[in-house]
Image (cartoon, rainbow, N blue to C red):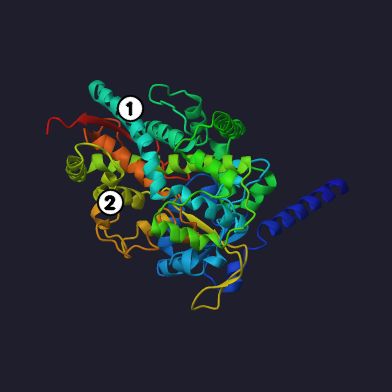
């Protein structure tokens, strides 16, 4: 016979289990009530158990849904117990990004300002008026004039990198591409953002490189924290989860503080992003280049900015750090897959080299901003790399005020996250025939053809502010490889690429391993 105490214990356990189940499934009829087709959820994980349990990459998860619900403009999903909408239709995406942007201003990522200030206060993660103010003030920092001023520093880093490539041809070294590109972009971004010389090739363990790598190290715990931050931001906020290791946060805060203090003391003025941030902090604005289009765009935004805008020291550090993060990861990812595809497609590589030879012949071998702009085929290669492997496979917007989906009676409630499956759109044969094939010519006459289908940097007012910087340094990186060398598969190359399911940004499991050879035999 079961004792009374045991009966009470079992009853309480049953009641707690029932209450937990009701709590975890409370919203699971949300999309059904709205008449929206949805992916069936399970307690705790919602629709994405395979992603939470790190059994599947987020891009293959969204790809499965995209294919299963082909023809539907949108589908409901659940991230944990939170309802989200997956937008599958380019026309609806256009409304979200541009036409009805006022309803979808925020990215929706939430970071605790005290625990993770460099993320919480960065332009990418700011919301509402705070984002609008910061964006308006930062627009002039990435004009063509500012990029031209930074180009000599980029070229200096590229020249040192080229010397290392020369040595690699002599030793026939097999190299992991993303790690090697990380060295180059650490040097470029260290110079252009912070104004420091890293010389990472010769000093791979310099503190800037070590701390930079820490920001991208993913173990199980970090992967889980990232999943929670992306899919359940409210939970991440309550738990004060951080996306950066504490020592890395302190390093970049101190680095920014020391640079500002040193320059104020020495009155040194440099052509880098940190100098522009100091100008913004001191004067409240950055001088706009005499570029008509960019000046007009700046003026359009200026009237929305708060007149009493002030940039604090931690604001300054946050912007410098996020541009390091974004510039490093985007360019490393894009160029890694671009070089991989060039090795796999020698005809494409040869065409790129012919363009480089032709343009540099006009400048007697000198790399200039205008020469880089003329290299259209390099642009096509980078675009095709981002099509196949978009740095952000899923984009996110949060509904900031109730919105009725055009031509329907379905409303998106305030606070609902809308996700755009960039990878799925980029690899849809309806828009890109034979999507597995690497074909830069797709972009030779794009016009408006791929707008709101091809979105590697987002679209609309929240489009990546540093996209031109990323493209310029990525083109320079490809040029540095291709003008004197060619990339080829190595004995360690795995084809096709197998993605690491622990990483949100597309990353090859085990790395991309290539070799380079001199072009002199041609």
| Relative side of 63 to 372, left or right | right
Image vertical order of residue 198 relative to residue 193, above or below:
above
Image vertical order of residue 92 relative to residue 471, above or below:
below
- Residue named by callout 2: 380
Q: Position of residue 233 (x, y in %)?
A: 62, 51
Q: Secondary structure at mark 1?
A: helix
Image vertical order of residue 210 relative to residue 123, above or below:
above
Nearer to me, 226 or 259: 259
Q: Position of residue 239 (x, y in %)?
A: 68, 44
Q: Residue furthest left?
A: 522
Indicate the quadrant containing the C terminus: top left, top right, bottom left or bottom right: top left
Residue at the spot x=65%, y=54% of the render? 308
Q: Position of residue 40 (x, y in %)?
A: 55, 62
- Residue named by callout 1: 160
Residue at the spot x=25%, y=61% of the render? 445
Residue at the spot x=40%, y=38% of the render? 509
Q: Secondary structure at mark 2?
A: helix
């Amino acid at each position: 016979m079961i004792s009374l105490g045991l009966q009470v214990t079992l009853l309480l356990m049953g009641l707690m289990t029932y209450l937990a189940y009701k709590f975890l499934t409370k919203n699971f009829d949300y999309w059904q009530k709205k008449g929206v087709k949805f992916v069936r959820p399970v307690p705790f994980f919602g629709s994405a158990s395979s992603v939470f349990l790190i059994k599947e990459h987020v891009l293959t998860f969204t790809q499965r849904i995209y294919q299963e619900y082909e023809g539907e403009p949108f589908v409901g999903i659940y991230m944990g117990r939170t309802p989200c909408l997956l937008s599958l239709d380019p026309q609806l995406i256009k409304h979200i990004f541009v036409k009805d942007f006022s309803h979808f201003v925020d990215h929706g990522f939430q970071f605790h300002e005290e625990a993770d200030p460099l993320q919480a206060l960065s332009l990418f993660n700011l919301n509402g008026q705070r984002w609008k103010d910061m964006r308006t003030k930062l627009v002039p920092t990435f004009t063509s004039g500012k990029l031209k001023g930074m180009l000599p520093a980029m070229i200096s880093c590229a020249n040192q990198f080229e010397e290392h490539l020369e040595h690699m041809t002599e030793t026939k070294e097999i190299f992991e591409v993303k790690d090697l590109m990380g060295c180059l972009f650490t040097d470029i971004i260290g110079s252009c953002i912070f104004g420091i010389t890293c010389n990472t090739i010769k000093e791979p363990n310099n503190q800037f490189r070590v701390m930079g790598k820490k920001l991208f190290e993913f173990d199980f715990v970090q992967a889980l924290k990232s999943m929670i931050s992306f899919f359940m931001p409210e939970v991440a906020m309550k738990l004060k989860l951080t996306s950066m290791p504490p020592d890395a946060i302190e390093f970049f805060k101190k680095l920014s503080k020391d640079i500002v203090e040193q320059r104020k003391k020495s009155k040194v003025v440099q052509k880098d992003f940190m100098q522009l941030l100091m100008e913004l902090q001191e004067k409240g604005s950055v001088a706009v280049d005499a570029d008509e289009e960019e000046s007009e765009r700046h003026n359009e935004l200026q009237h929305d900015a708060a007149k009493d805008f002030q940039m604090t020291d931690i604001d300054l550090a946050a912007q410098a750090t996020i541009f390091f993060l974004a510039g490093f990861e985007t360019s490393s990812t894009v160029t890694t897959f671009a070089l991989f595809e060039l090795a796999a497609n020698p005809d494409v590589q040869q065409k790129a080299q012919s363009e480089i030879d032709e343009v540099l012949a006009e400048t007697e071998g000198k790399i200039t901003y205008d020469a880089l702009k003329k290299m259209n085929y390099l642009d096509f290669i980078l675009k095709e790399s981002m099509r196949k492997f978009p740095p952000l496979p899923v984009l996110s917007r949060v509904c900031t005020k109730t919105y009725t989906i055009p031509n329907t009676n379905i409303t998106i409630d305030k606070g609902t996250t809308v996700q755009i499956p960039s990878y799925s759109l980029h690899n849809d044969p309806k828009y890109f025939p034979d999507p597995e094939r690497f074909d830069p010519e797709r972009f030779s006459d794009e016009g408006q053809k791929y707008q709101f289908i091809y979105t590697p940097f987002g679209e609309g007012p929240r489009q990546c502010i540093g996209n031109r910087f990323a493209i310029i340094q990525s083109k320079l990186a490809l040029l540095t490889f291709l003008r004197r060398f060619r990339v080829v598969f190595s004995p360690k190359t795995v084809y096709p690429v197998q993605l690491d399911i622990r990483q949100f940004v597309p990353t090859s499991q085990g790395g991309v391993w290539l070799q380079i050879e001199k072009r002199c035999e041609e």
